[in-house]
């Protein structure tokens, strides 16, 4: 059972790392398509700041996956960043500050969070 759970966590870390890396790089690789999908922005510098941070988080999670380092710090980074992004997505989309397309990202973040809870619950109080 432990080997199965370790493989599951390994896959989860890869998936989240790649998702964050791709979404973080998108504004740098093709700003026009990013703005077309997500709506106009007044502060491009702020968009790129957030994108840079999401990219670094994604790369950090990918490095952990490639090294098979599944510890509390990586789990906290992965879950905490997903929770923060989901909360921001929902709050500002519901309050019509950002386009509702961000709710799709909130769903993706929510799935990552639920999957982390499932994976950690399977460890039965064992520290990563």
Image (cartoon, grey):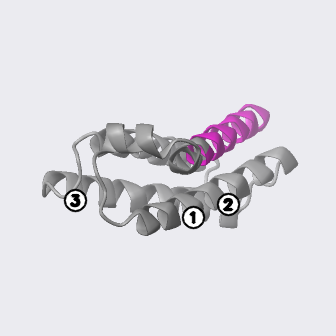
Q: CA distance from mark 1 to mark 2?
A: 15 Å
Q: CA distance from mark 1 to mark 3?
A: 20 Å
- Dividing the picture into quarters, in which one does residue 88 lie? bottom left
> Can residue 18 be seen in the rendering of this structure?
yes
Q: Position of residue 86 (x, y in %)?
A: 36, 54
Q: Position of residue 25 (x, y in %)?
A: 59, 48
Looking at this view, is 112 or 24 the one in front?
A: 24
Q: Which residue is mark 1?
A: 53
Q: Is residue 14 left or right of residue 100?
A: right
Looking at this view, is 98 or 5 the one in front?
A: 98
Residue visible at 23% across and 46% down in the picture: 99
Vertical placement of 8 versus 52: above or below?
above
Q: Quadrant of the N terminus?
A: top right
Looking at this view, name the residue that lies furthest to the right. 67
Q: Which residue is mark 2?
A: 74
Secondary structure character of the magenta stretch overall: helix
Packing grade of label 1 (10 A; few <14, some 14-19, many >=20) is some
Looking at this view, name the residue that lies furthest to the front. 32
SS at badge 2: helix
Q: CA distance from mark 3 to mark 2?
A: 26 Å
Q: Which of the numbered marks, if any, corresponds to residue 91?
A: 3
Q: Position of residue 28 (x, y in %)?
A: 57, 50
For marks 1 and 3, the one nearer the N-term is: 1
SS at badge 3: helix
């Amino acid at each position: 059972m432990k080997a199965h759970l370790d493989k599951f966590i390994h896959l989860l870390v890869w998936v989240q790392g790649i998702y964050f890396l791709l979404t973080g790089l998108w504004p740098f690789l093709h700003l026009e398509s990013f703005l077309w999908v997500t709506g106009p922005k007044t502060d491009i510098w702020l968009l790129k700041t957030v994108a840079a941070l999401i990219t670094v988080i994604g790369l950090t999670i990918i490095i952990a996956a490639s090294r098979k380092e599944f510890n509390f710090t990586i789990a906290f980074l992965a879950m905490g960043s997903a929770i923060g992004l989901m909360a921001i997505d929902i709050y500002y989309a519901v309050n019509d500050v950002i386009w509702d397309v961000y709710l799709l990202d909130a769903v993706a973040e929510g799935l990552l969070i639920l999957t982390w809870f499932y994976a950690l619950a399977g460890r039965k109080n064992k520290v990563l």
